[in-house]
Amino acid sequence: MKKHIFSLAFITLIASYAEACYVSYVHGLNRYGDNFLAVRTGPSTRYRQIDSLYNGDRVFICDYSRGWRLVYYSGYRGSCYLDRGRPYGDCHRGWVYWKYVE
């Protein structure tokens, strides 16, 4: 019984850790190329672009799918923060390619 309780507690801890967002920054964009990171409605280039991010922009990575990351970032009228590992405030969200935020 004690072993099962410990296992359940450990799994709950891991699951809650996996759901937490973490801070990252946009980097590595080619200033002689497009010089922006496309934010999309889903995790693929087949999804519509809804916004652009630039080198140095702060993002909160909250999920992933294949080579894509679900990010939250500050909107134009305010700021986006993390509160207990979750986005809070004036946050926009979308999917970006992993290479430029990890």
Image (cartoon, rainbow, N blue to C red):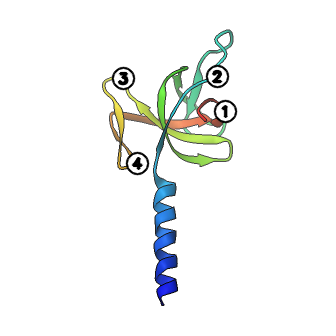
Q: Is residue 40 left or right of residue 78?
A: right
Across and down, in percent, residue 23 comes to 47, 37
In terms of secondary structure, where does tag 2 sit?
Answer: loop
CB of mark 1 within 8 Å of CB of mark 3? no
Is any atom of residue 20 visible in this view? yes
Mark with earlier residue (2, 1): 2
Across and down, in percent, residue 98 comes to 64, 36
Tell me the number on the disc at residue 28. Answer: 2
Q: CA distance from mark 4 to mark 2?
A: 26 Å
In terms of secondary structure, where does tag 4 sit?
Answer: loop
Mark with earlier residue (1, 3): 3
Q: Is residue 46 left or right of residue 2?
A: right
Q: Residue at x 31, y 27 (%)?
A: 78
Tell me the crowding category of disc 4: few under 14, some 14 to 19, or many 20 or more residues within 10 angstroms, Cα based. some
Q: Which residue is mark 4?
A: 85
Q: Which residue is mark 1?
A: 99
Above-or-below relation of 2 to 84: below
Q: Is residue 66 left or right of residue 8?
A: right
Q: Residue furthest bottom?
A: 1
